[in-house]
């Protein structure tokens, strides 16, 4: 059977020219390793920025004279907003306790006061995906419309900066990642062309005895797939080692999502397959 | 008369750099024939064989090989044509990292033959060329004559209509060459046509029962099967000093 033949030939190539196969796999592995390191860095920068964003809060300070039932009604309404993750009521007493705790240098000042000058407030946290300046501004607008609200605060400036930073990081990642992928592709394509060239006599003899193009291509394509996969797994191993080393010695890192790993391995395998197919086909068309 | 397997009709072949390689070549090879194709190096012998394999197409004229015409050849038909031809070269062209057995099996595997069929057939072919005991030897472990026998077994694997041999004994000592030639005679006796390109005139003259076509500068100068006076035989080396 041709399929059986293709599988046998593809695996036989590993035995017959182990060095060439190893070199191709290493070329793929190192290109993908660079990409893996880059993914690791990008992912951790993104996560760090996300963690900062998680702290995005809109605070609505309430009037002294706000009627309690109006405040409770407002809390229910706010909690029902789709963008809102959590609404926390901070009473005047809690605000004072927090102020005493967090701003120890002003402790005496607060302790000398006869009345509590701090207002009650709502701390509103938004759901992930809605922590952008536009939504925050809209929620702030909504809060200001309540008669019970005296003032609304949110870190507009730094929020805008973080969003900008994230966009920059994402754009940079896309451009650099793309460039690295292209470099990897060129290296892999060259390695596979060498492999095809090394077997040109075999190809010539195959054609002489009446092999169809498809029959000649199949083992190469399969070999490309296997080499790509092997390179991908090797790159994964190297990335894991780098991740462990950096986490242990420098900063604790977060591992890249499984989806990325899977995508990388699939890409490696498909890339090996495609570049083999192209290299063999070009060889067959030009000789 | 039997059906022609190979038919050249007024074939011209021109290469962009080296000019005309074949001029107005017309001949037929019929089923079961044994034909020597002779001439100096560069006379066009290899070009004739290349055109039969349809590795190249004629510049003018038509080459017909077992139902395929050079005028209507599609890329995907070439493998089908090649399976009807057995080819043997001066330098054997065996795959160095495969055993004798595997080199022969290769020609069957490319046609998608079943494993069991491949097995029995390879065994039979090895026996036919007298190498049953060397099935597992690699080409470099075999003598030149033995390597050529493996190549011949491979050429016979798909039961070709014609065996095309390009200087098959060119790299062999006289003893091995004689053995190989005897093998060709046996193959021919079993019904396969043989077209053997050679510049060994001694061999040609020693077997006057076989047809001779002599090429000179791309033209047929002598064809022993052609009626007298068809060619200007004055240039034919085969006829001199004989």
Image (tube, coloured by chain):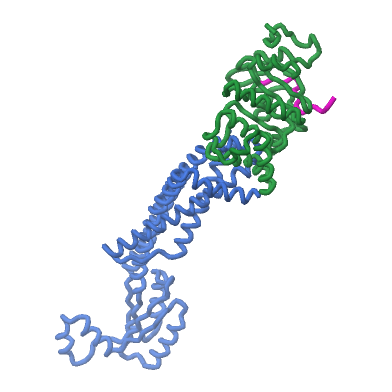
Q: Is residue A54 above or below residue B113?
A: below
Q: Closest to the observer: A206 or B182?
A: B182
Q: Is residue B232 left or right of residue A41?
A: right
Quarter of the picture holding the C terminus of chain A = top right
Chain depicted in blue: A
Q: Is residue A200 above or below residue B4?
A: below
Residue B23, percent from left and from top = 69, 16
Q: Residue A200 location, x and y as percent?
A: 54, 36
Q: Main secondary structure of the magenta part?
A: strand
Residue at 39 percent across and 52 percent down: it is A176
**Residue B210 located within the stretch drawn in magenta:** no
Residue nearer the viewer, A67 or B32: B32
Q: Residue at x 57, y 34 (%)?
A: B94
Vertical side of A69 occupied by A14: above or below: above
| Boundaries of the magenta span | B1-13
Residue A24 is at least partly visible in this image: yes
Measuring from the top left, give residue A180's x and y in whole percent: 41, 50
Look at chain B in the picture and name its colour: green
Res B70 visible: no
In the orientation shown, which residue stands out farthest toward the front? Answer: B133
């Amino acid at each position: 059977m041709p399929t059986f033949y293709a599988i046998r030939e593809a695996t036989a190539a590993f035995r017959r020219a182990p060095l060439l196969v190893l070199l191709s796999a290493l070329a793929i592995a190192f290109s993908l390793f660079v990409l893996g390191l880059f993914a690791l860095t990008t992912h951790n920068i993104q996560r760090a920025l996300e963690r900062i964003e998680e702290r995005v809060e809109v605070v609505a300070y309430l009037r002294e004279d706000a009627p309690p039932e109006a405040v409770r009604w407002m809390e229910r309404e706010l909690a029902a907003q789709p963008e809102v993750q959590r609404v926390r009521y901070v009473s005047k007493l809690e605000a004072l306790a927090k102020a005493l705790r967090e701003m120890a240098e002003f402790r005496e000042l607060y302790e000398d006061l006869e009345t509590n000058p701090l207002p009650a407030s709502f701390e509103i946290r938004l759901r992930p995906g809605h922590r952008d300046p536009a939504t925050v501004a809209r929620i702030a607008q909504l809060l200001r419309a309540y008669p019970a609200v005296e003032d609304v605060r949110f870190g507009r400036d730094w929020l805008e900066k973080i969003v900008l930073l994230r966009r920059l990081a994402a754009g940079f990642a896309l451009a650099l990642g793309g460039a690295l992928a292209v470099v990897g592709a060129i290296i892999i394509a060259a390695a596979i062309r060498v492999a095809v060239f090394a077997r040109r006599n075999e190809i010539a003899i195959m054609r002489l005895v009446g092999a169809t193009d498809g029959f000649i291509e199949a083992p190469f394509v399969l070999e490309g797939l296997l080499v790509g996969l092997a390179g991908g797994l090797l790159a994964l191993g190297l990335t894991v080692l780098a991740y462990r080393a950096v986490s242990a010695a420098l900063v604790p890192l977060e591992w890249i999502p499984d989806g990325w790993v899977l995508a990388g391995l699939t890409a490696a395998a498909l890339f090996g397959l495609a570049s083999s197919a192209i290299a063999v086909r070009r060889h067959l068309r030009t000789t | 008369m039997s059906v022609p397997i190979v038919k050249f009709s007024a074939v011209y072949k021109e290469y962009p750099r080296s000019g005309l390689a074949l001029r107005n070549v017309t001949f037929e090879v019929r089923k079961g024939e044994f034909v020597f194709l002779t001439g100096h190096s560069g006379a066009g012998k290899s070009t004739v064989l290349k055109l039969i394999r349809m590795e190249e197409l004629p510049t003018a004229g038509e080459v017909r090989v077992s139902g395929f015409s050079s005028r209507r050849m599609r890329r995907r038909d070439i493998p089908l044509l090649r399976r009807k031809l057995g080819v043997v070269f001066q330098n054997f062209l065996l795959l160095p990292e495969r055993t004798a057995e595997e080199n022969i099996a290769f020609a069957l595997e490319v046609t998608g033959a079943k494993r069991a069929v491949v097995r029995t057939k390879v065994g039979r072919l090895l026996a036919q060329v007298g190498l049953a005991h060397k099935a597992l030897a690699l080409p470099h472990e075999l003598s030149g004559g033995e390597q050529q026998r493996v190549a011949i077994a491979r050429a016979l694997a798909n039961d070709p209509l014609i065996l095309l041999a390009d200087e098959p004994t060119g790299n062999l000592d006289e003893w091995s060459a004689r053995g190989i030639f005897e093998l060709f005679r046996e193959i021919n006796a079993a019904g396969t046509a043989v077209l053997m390109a050679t510049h060994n005139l001694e061999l040609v003259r020693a077997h006057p029962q076989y047809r001779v076509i002599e090429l000179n500068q791309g033209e047929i100068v002598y064809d022993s099967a052609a009626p007298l006076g068809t060619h200007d035989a004055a240039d034919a080396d085969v006829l001199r000093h004989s």
